[in-house]
Image: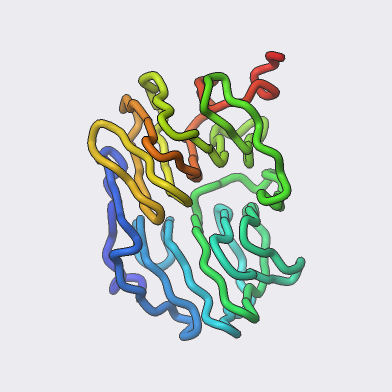
Amino acid sequence: MNEAMPDLHADLSRRAMVATAQEDWQPSPSGTVWRKPLYREGGEFGPVTSVVRYMPGGAFREHPHPQGEEILVLSGVFSDDSGDFPTGSWLFNPEGFSHAPHSTPGCDLLVRLRQYPGAQRGRRLIDTAAEPWRAGLLPGLWLKPLYVETGYPEYVCLLRLEPGTELPVQHFEAGAEYFVLEGSLCDDAGEYVAGSWLRLPAGVEQTVRSKAGCIAYLRLGERSGGVFESHQENGTA
């Protein structure tokens, strides 16, 4: 099976974008779980980013997660041995974690596999729906920080742009990855509606804006100290 799965957007030096609403669902080995792959390198058992759909009653057998797993519940209720996680839940399962995931009512997820090496990372569970928005460093920008951990480079958050907000040009030294949850996000290359996944390579510059407003998942390859931090993180009042 590993050889039968072709690489997808595996050149990390290139910009990649997928409008997932226009993509067809593909079966997984489970038979009750479907997916829309966004990034895949090295076949079924390499690093992968996908939108995943559990049908009602869908399940996988118990399995480990080498190099970690990140999940954002887009709709429905996702469950595993540790509990039930409704829409808006964000889960980080580090290397060495094992579970048997399933969903009684069904759910849609954004999933990143094998992209967080390091056995000493801590497990995280966040109900983002219950978390307050924190004011960003610029007007019209709001944030919900999800992941930053001493000794590791990544920074993950939810961001909200109020209608008409335009941010100054950002330089992403280690790249950036977006998944638009609501509304639409724009840059000089185009507009990205809900369900769009966008990955920017290391060293790229981007000017982000939103005409009607948006909410998006954002992952940075490193915590840059730029505008995508809240006043609390930055230490300002």
Residue closest to the eye, 168 or 211: 211
In percent of width and height, residue 191 lies at 29, 42
Residue drawn at x 67%, y 64% is: 86
Q: Image quadrant of residue 105?
A: bottom right
Q: Is residue 6 above or below residue 47?
A: below
Give the residue at the far right of this rendering: 82
Residue drawn at x 28%, y 74% is: 4
Residue drawn at x 23%, y 36% is: 189
Give the residue at the far top of this rendering: 236
Residue closest to the eye, 65 or 207: 207
Q: Is residue 113 above or below residue 121?
A: below
Q: Quadrant of the N terminus?
A: bottom left
In percent of width and height, residue 8 lies at 28, 58
In percent of width and height, residue 132 lies at 70, 39
In percent of width and height, residue 193 lies at 35, 50
User: How was this image coloured?
Assistant: rainbow
Residue closest to the eye, 34 or 10: 34
Q: Is residue 104 left or right of residue 205?
A: right
Residue drawn at x 67%, y 51% is: 129
Q: Quadrant of the C terminus?
A: top right
Q: Image quadrant of residue 184?
A: top left
Q: Image quadrant of residue 38?
A: bottom left
